[in-house]
Structures are given as structure tokens and as C-alpha cells.
Image (spheres, helix red, strand yellow):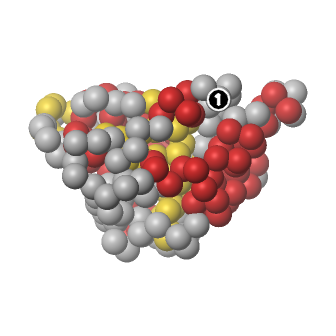
Amino acid sequence: MAQKTMIQAITDALALELENDENVVVFGEDVGKNGGVFRATEGLQEKFGEDRVFDTPLAESGIAGLSFGLALEGFRPVPEIQFFGFIFEAMDEVVAQMARTRYRMSGTRNLPITIRSPFGGGVHTPELHSDNLEGLIAQSPGIRVVIPSNPYDAKGLLISSIRSNDPVVFLEHMKLYRSFREEVPDESY
């Protein structure tokens, strides 16, 4: 087992799931060529191509809407909201559409969407970049909220989230991205 930071564990989980399932797609602002603001998707576009790992416009409502549509068509979207403070732009899609579709359609449809987003204070970021809004989402029926606290849990929980048939909001505390390393298995778990 290698010693990894949380960001490395997240990248590993994304790579494993992209390799494991051709319906997994990763997208968001700057996640393609640049690898995201925190480099969580670094190298993934080069390895899996622009059709599976791609950039979107700066429009969180569009990212959420694309996720919803792709999930209804059988994909497993893993969109990134660049900072969780920007989730307000996507709230209708997340809490009124994604969260309720299984119920609305009598359990006949799955919405395997995993929304990834950095969040959290203590990192000296500007407004809207360090908001802790997980409580808003946690109060919405039909959405799972996952917040790992270490690299080992981050990789395993992200894999489980992507494989879930329910929508998941996967929050990554920015202060934990590179603050320590721990042993993380190379394989899925």
C-alpha cells in the first residue's frame, strides 16, 4: 500500500471507476486539461479522453442539468462543483429533481450521480469558496451526503458513491486535501 494524500486517493478512485465502467463521465469547470483547481482530475482526460473527462462552461445550473439528463440516459455522471458555495446555482436540479426522481417515477429510474465539491473553512479563501452548506443538502430527502475525513475513507467512499444508484453529494474538505498521508490500497474497496 502506498502513502497517499486525500487528493491522490480521490484521483485514484476516479481513475478506477472510469476504467471499471464506460458509463462513468467526469466533468466540471477546468477538470479536463487543467485537472481541476485542486488537481483532483489531473491526468484523467489524457488517459480516458475528452468524451469521458471534460470541461464545462462556468454554469453550475448547466452542470447539474447535464448530470440529471446523462443519468436518465444510463450514464454515471461525476460532476464537480468547483466550490460548494456555488451549489445555490444548482439547487433546483439537486434537491427538486435529482433527489425526487426515484420517488416521482415509482422507483423505475435510477439517478447514479455523484456531485463532488470542495468545501470548508480555515483555508483563507474568498467569499463563497469556503462555505459549509452540507446541512442544506442533508435536509433534502433522496440525497446522500458523504464527507470523508482521511485518504483511506475518501477513496473507498468515492468508489461506493459512484457505484450507488442514488444521487450523492461527496464533499471534500479543502484543508484535508494535502494535510497528511496514510496508507491507501491500490485496488477498489
Rendered residue at 31%/58% (across/down) = 126
Give coordinates of residue 59: x percent, y percent.
58, 66
Q: On the rendered image, what quadrant is the C terminus found in? A: top left
Identify the amino acid type marked 1. Ser
Q: Relative to 2, is 54 on the left or the right?
A: right
Q: Is residue 154 visible?
A: yes
Q: Number of marks in the image?
A: 1
Against 89, is 121 above or below?
Answer: above
Q: Name the quadrant containing residue 94.
A: top right
Instruction: Indicate left or right for 11 with 64 as reference.
Output: left
Q: Position of residue 143 (x, y in %)?
A: 62, 31
- Of residue 159 and residue 147, the one placed in the foreground of this image is 147
**Residue at position x 39%, y 31% in the image:** 147
Image vertical order of residue 122 relative to residue 15, above or below: above
Camera sees residue 10: no
Quarter of the image with the N terminus in it: top left
User: How far across and how far down the image is residue 69, in percent?
Assistant: 73, 55
In this view, 188 is above or below 92? above
The residue at 45%/30% (across/down) is 146
How packed mark 1 is, by other alpha carbons closer than 10 Å (few <14, some 14-19, many 20 or more), is: some
Query: Residue 80 placed where, x, y %?
Result: 48, 54
In the image, 138 versus 178, the foreground residue is 138
Query: Which residue is painted at 65% across and 63% down in the image?
Result: 62
The residue singled out by tag 1 in the image is: 140
Quarter occupied by residue 182: top left
Q: Nearer the viewer, residue 147 or 15?
A: 147
Q: Residue furthest front?
A: 127
| Helix, strand or loop status at disc 1 | loop
